[in-house]
Amino acid sequence: MARVTQLQLVALAPRRTLWQRARLHFRKNGAYWLMALPGLILIFVFAYAPLPGIVLAFKNFKYNLGIWGSEWVGLKNFAFLIRTPLAGRVLLNTLFMNALFIISGTVVSMFLALLMNEIHHKLRARFYQTAMFFPYFLSAIVVSYLVFALLSADNGLLNRLLINLGREPVKWYSEAKHWPVILVLVHLWKSAGFGSILYLAGMLAISPEYYEAARIDGASKVKQIFYITLPLLSPIIVIQVLLAIGRIFYADFGLFFVVTRDQAPLRATTEVIDTYVFRALRTLGDTGMAAAAGFAQSLIGFLLVLVSNFIVRRIDPDKSLF
Amino acid sequence: MASVAKTNTRDMTHPKHSHALAAVSRAFVDAVLALFAVACIVPLLLVISASFSTDASIFKSGYTLLPTEFSTMAYRYVLGDPTQILRAYALTSFVAAAGTIFGLLICSMLAYALSRNSFGARRPLSFMVFFTLLFNGGLIPFYLFVVQTLQLKNNILVLILPLLVNGWNVLLLRTSFKQLPEELLDAARIDGASEWRIFFQVAVPLSTPVLATVGLFILLSYWNDWWMSLLFIDKKELYSLQFLLYQISQSVQAINNNPQVLAQLGTTKLPAESTRMALAVLAIGPVAFAYLFLQKYLVRGITIGSLK
């Protein structure tokens, strides 16, 4: 409607100069622009203005020369990055751990939502949700304290239990092989409950008539889940997984750096791109290589979202992100 | 919840279904959920219990769900020399309050403008917000820009400004504002209300769940932030609560690895385990409070905001 009138306006009043059109636009939209401005400025400053700094990935950065004064080195930073002995390990850890998080997170969140959907008792539903969402709101620092209470070599609950069962205690913070499992469990503990909100919201939006019809036809609860709930939720699931795949090169820094207490012996399984970039910046001081790693991470992540979105769009446009 | 209607019809339409089986499966559902809920809370209980234990008892029997020797020693110790913790508390409270108020205001104004069909520039500007979620320049350009161009290292503003606007929150709010009944806004417009007045007196009051949800997200992003401190803060006076917790566990670890550090730090005493856990409990306290207070809006807020 509004679009048609705008078109008509343009047709009726030809040969407006750019300036006149801009003035008309601002007279109509001035309040909107003023409302949007503070947010737009902040987004510009903190998300767009730093972008030119990407050139650092192609430079040999020297603090005294600054971003623009530093010497161009082409793809040398990337070549150096690829030749680092750790590079393959870091990349593999990032992808492997994130894949584990995506799969386990989706399955467990979905499962919890299906169970929550069966709870019709208000008070109990409130209790379960309050407890399930709570860990999501704790900082990684606090989580590291909680995990320490469980895993501390001398006083941790887990080792005390092992001793009581007559088993050998484990030095959790110096044995890398346990950490993929520990981190998956911590990740599920922290976010699976909260992740179920979205699925539960989707389930509540499904019309009860579908289930009534299915019941009249004699479909069991399990059949209803597989033939009604899951198919109707698939757009939400697909979008969530898509978003997660787009971020598969980004690791949760708090989980991998703080919760592991940045213990060197654990890095074989817990060093990921984000912790590596941070360490390159902080301790190695290799800004060029860190920038190259960060840029590769952003670019590949971006391409991944575009590709996966394109594929989903081809299959079912309703399920695509954009 | 919304599916209450289902329960009423279940037994009538399905007489063949055995009641015993239904009861068993209901019990199973409850058992699994209760187990998960308890698992979510247990680590927290460990820490609270440790904060109320004597160090000797932690050393003797480890972390337990209930203190074996009850003591408020750790809290008296923390609050006995309160300068550092109080300063961190004050700083974090200030940053969180300022950040939440301005963040919520700025995000919702932007989201409202982007939600209006009559706003000619809404498409390119929405894309500008959305794009930040898909692509960013990485840590190094951001770090150097803040340090060199904005010169915000060791400035309290660096703890507030970068977190004020978050693309997800803007999109959540925009989706919610889009669903406001257009007739209502038009009615206000015909009565001569300005766009600002419509925003503050019609749109905002009608969006309580989503505003409470986003407000909680913003509040927690400030209260729980340590990343900005880790990157940009090394002055002790500007330590936030979370960063103080982080520094304490770092120094404890450094001392465990190398006892000489203690002398270098100029202190003779390590914060004991119970003291550290008391600090953690004090840091969780306000979060838990805000969460319990706003939790009832969460599901509704996210539901409204995330419908495509």
Image (cartoon, helix red, strand yellow):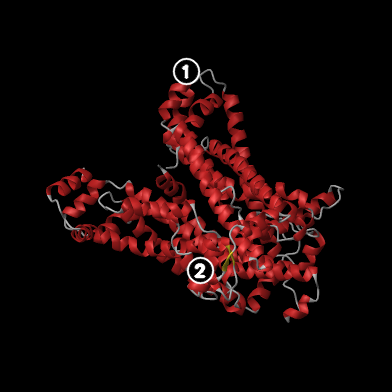
Residue position marked by numbered label 2 in the rendering:
B145
Q: In the rendered image, which quarter is residue A60 located in?
A: bottom right
Residue at 13 percent of width and 51 percent of height: A13
Q: Secondary structure at mark 2?
A: helix
Q: x, y percentage for residue A104?
A: 62, 41
Residue at position x 57%, y 21% from top?
B18
Give the label, 1 or 2, closer to the camera. 2
- The one nearer the camera, B175 or B282, is B175
Q: Which residue is painted at 61% across and 64% down in the image?
A: A288
- Relative image position of residue B137 (x, y in whole percent): 52, 59
Residue B40 position, x and y percent, is: 62, 50
> Is residue A247 toward the left or the right of residue A153 in the image?
left
Identify the residue under disc 1: A217
Q: Is residue B29 left or right of residue A16?
A: right
Q: Splitting the image into 4 quarters, where does residue A34 fall? A: bottom left
Q: Amino acid at mark 2?
A: Phe
Indicate which disc residue A200 carries.
Answer: none
Name the chain letter of the residue that bears numbered label 1.
A
Residue A198: percent from left, percent from top: 49, 43
Q: Is residue A69 above or below residue A320?
A: below
Residue depicted at x 42% and y 32%: B5
Callout 1 amino acid: Asp
